[in-house]
Image (cartoon, rainbow, N blue to C red):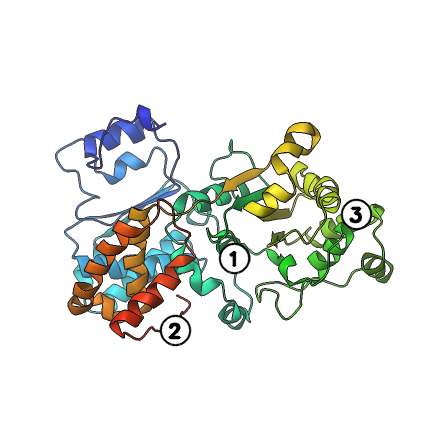
C-alpha cells in the first residue's frame, strides 16, 4: 500500500526505488517497465542500474544505455507501443522501433535501448488478437470512439474495469459482471465503448445494447432478443453478429415473456462463447424495463454470468442516477442478499475544476492546431483562468465539447472534425 513506500513525493530516487520494488512494497506489480530516460540501464554509482531494480517483479524492462535525445526517445516509444498494439512480442516490437529510428539516420540513438527479460517474450504481456478486416470502417462509424480523447486520462475507472475482466495478478479475482453508475454525462457510454474496442483487440465478440432506442417498454425476455440480435441502424457499429438462434427459441423470444426461456438462452450464449469470449454492454436503460423485468434479468442472466456459469461471457450494466433510483438498486441488494453477487461496481463522477481545466487544454489542442501554437495559447490561457474561477465543484465530462465550441466561437477559430487516433 502507499503508506509502506519509502518515498514521500514525486522525486523517487534510485535507492528508494530499489527498496520499494525490491521489497515488493508496491500495491501492484508491473508486467513491463519502459524507462525511457538517459542511462537508466547503466549503474549510476550503486550496485545495479535503475532498470535492474525492477527485475524482481517485472517480466520485462526496457531502459537506455546512453543519453538519448528527447526526439529520438519520443519516436522510439511511439513506434514501440504501436507494434505492441499490433500484437508483436516485446522483443520484436522493440526491434521494429529501433529499425525505424536507425532508418532515420539515428543509428547511435537506436542502439541505446536495452531489453532484459525474465520470461519468454510472448509470455510477458497479454497478446492482442488481429482486428476484424472491416474494423476501420466500423470504428469510423462509431460516434463514441472519437470522443474517447476526453476520457483517456480517467485512469482509475479504466484500471478497475480491466482489473476485473483481465486480472494482472493470479490472486486477483475475476469479475465477469460490472455495474457502472453515476450522473449523466460522466462517461458511462464512453467507458463502455472503450471496453468494447479493447475487447475486440482481445479477440472478443462484442455486443452493444441501448434501450433508449426502444420506443415501447422492454420485457426481460425482449432484452434477451436484443442482446442476441442487436443490429438496428442505431446500434453501435462495434457490435459483432452472432449465429442465428434455433428458430423456435428465436420466435419465442419475440413473442413470449416466459422466464423459462432464460435457460435455453444461457445455453446458447454459453455455446457461442466457447471458443471466442462475448462481452455485452447494456446501456441507457432510461427505465424502459419495468422493475420486475429488471430484477428477473439480474436473477436469471446476470447472476449466472457473475458466478461463472457462463465462463466466457462478460456483462457491463450501465445505469444512470435515475435508473439507479428507479430500480432501487441499493435497497434490493440489501434486502435480497442472494442478488448481492460478486461484481465490479464502478461509480463515475464528474471532474474537479482543476482536472477539467487541465484536460480542456489538451482537448482544445487535439481539436484545433491553433491552440498548439504560441498565439493560440496566449488566447486560451486567460479563458482557462476565467473558466477555472467559474466552474462548479464537479463538471460532467460531456460538457467539454460544449465549452470548446463556445471558446472557438468567441475567437472565431475553426474546429477540426473529431477524428479517430
- Identify residue for label 3: 262
Does residue 172 appear to the left or right of 150 in the view shown?
Answer: right
Label 1, secondary structure: give it: helix
Q: Earlier in the sequence, mark 2 or mark 1?
A: 1
**Could you tell which of marks 3 and 2 lies nearer the N-terminus?**
3
- The CA span between labels 3 and 2 is 44 Å
* Image height of 320 relative to 144, above or below: above
Q: Residue furthest left?
A: 45
Q: In the figure, residue 157 lies in which quadrant?
A: top left
Mark 1 burial class by Cα count in 10 Å: few <14, some 14-19, many 20+? many
Q: Earlier in the sequence, mark 3 or mark 1?
A: 1
Q: Which of the numbered marks, if any, corresponds to residue 193?
A: 1
Count of residue discs: 3
Q: Position of residue 320 (x, y in %)?
A: 56, 48
Secondary structure beneath label 2: loop
Residue located at (34% from left, 33% from top): 56
Q: Quadrant of the C terminus?
A: bottom left
Q: Quadrant of the N terminus?
A: top left
Residue 279, position in %: x, y? 61, 52
Q: Name which quarter of the figure residue 218 lies in.
A: bottom right
Q: Disc 3 or disc 2, which is closer to the eye?
A: 2
Tell me where residue 303 appears, x and y as whole percent.
Answer: 69, 39
Circle 2 is placed at which residue position? 417
In the image, is 39 to the left or to the right of 344? Answer: left
Q: Is residue 375 above or below residue 190?
A: below
The crowd level at tag 2 (other Cα within 10 Å; few <14, some 14-19, many 20+) is few
Q: Is residue 315 left or right of residue 164?
A: right
Up/down of 306 relative to 25, above or below: below
Of residues 392 and 196, the one nearer the viewer is 392
Mark yes or no: residue 320 visible. Answer: no
The residue shown at (65%, 47%) is 312
Amino acid at each position: 500500500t502507499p503508506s509502506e513506500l519509502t518515498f514521500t513525493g514525486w522525486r523517487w530516487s534510485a535507492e528508494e526505488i530499489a527498496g520499494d520494488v525490491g521489497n515488493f512494497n508496491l500495491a501492484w506489480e508491473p508486467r513491463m517497465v519502459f524507462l525511457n530516460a538517459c542511462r537508466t540501464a547503466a549503474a549510476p554509482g550503486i550496485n545495479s542500474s535503475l532498470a535492474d531494480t525492477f527485475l524482481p517483479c517485472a517480466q520485462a524492462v526496457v531502459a537506455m544505455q546512453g543519453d538519448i535525445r528527447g526526439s529520438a526517445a519520443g519516436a522510439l516509444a511511439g513506434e514501440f507501443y504501436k507494434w505492441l498494439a499490433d500484437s508483436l512480442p516485446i522483443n520484436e516490437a522493440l526491434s521494429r522501433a529501433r529499425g525505424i529510428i536507425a532508418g532515420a539516420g539515428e543509428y547511435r540513438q537506436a542502439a541505446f535501448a536495452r531489453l532484459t527479460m525474465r520470461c519468454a517474450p510472448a509470455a510477458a504481456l497479454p497478446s492482442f488478437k488481429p482486428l476484424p478486416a472491416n474494423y476501420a470502417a466500423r470504428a469510423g462509424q462509431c460516434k463514441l470512439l472519437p470522443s474517447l480523447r476526453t476520457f483517456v486520462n480517467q485512469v482509475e475507472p479504466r484500471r478497475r474495469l480491466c482489473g476485473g475482466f483481465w486480472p494482472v495478478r493470479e490472486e486477483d479475482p475475476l469479475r465477469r459482471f460490472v455495474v457502472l453508475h453515476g450522473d449523466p454525462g460522466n462517461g458511462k457510454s464512453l467507458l463502455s465503448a472503450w471496453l468494447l474496442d479493447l475487447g475486440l483487440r482481445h479477440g472478443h465478440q462484442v455486443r452493444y445494447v441501448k434501450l433508449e432506442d426502444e420506443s415501447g417498454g422492454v420485457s426481460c425476455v425482449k432484452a434477451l432478443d436484443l442482446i442476441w440480435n442487436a443490429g438496428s441502424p442505431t446500434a453501435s457499429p462495434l457490435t459483432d453478429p452472432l449465429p442465428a438462434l434455433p428458430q423456435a427459441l428465436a420466435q419465442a423470444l419475440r413473442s413470449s415473456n416466459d422466464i423459462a426461456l432464460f435457460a435455453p438462452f444461457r445455453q446458447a450464449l454459453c455455446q457461442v462463447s466457447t471458443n471466442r469470449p462475448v462481452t455485452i454492454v447494456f446501456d441507457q436503460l432510461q427505465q424502459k424495463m419495468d422493475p420486475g423485468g429488471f430484477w428477473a434479468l439480474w436473477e436469471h442472466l446476470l447472476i449466472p454470468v457473475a458466478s461463472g456459469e457462463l465462463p466466457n461471457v462478460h456483462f457491463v450494466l450501465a445505469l444512470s442516477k435515475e435508473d439507479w433510483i428507479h430500480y432501487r438498486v441499493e435497497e434490493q441488494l440489501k434486502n435480497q442478499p442472494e442478488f448481492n453477487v460478486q461484481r465490479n461496481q464502478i461509480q463515475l463522477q464528474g471532474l474537479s475544476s482543476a482536472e477539467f481545466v487541465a484536460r480542456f487544454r489538451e482537448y482544445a489542442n487535439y481539436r484545433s492546431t491553433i491552440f498548439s501554437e504560441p498565439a493560440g495559447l496566449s488566447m486560451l490561457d486567460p479563458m482557462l483562468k476565467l473558466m477555472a474561477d467559474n466552474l462548479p465543484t464537479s463538471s460532467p465530462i460531456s460538457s467539454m465539447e460544449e465549452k470548446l465550441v463556445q471558446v472557438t466561437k468567441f475567437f472565431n477559430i475553426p474546429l477540426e472534425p473529431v477524428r479517430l487516433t
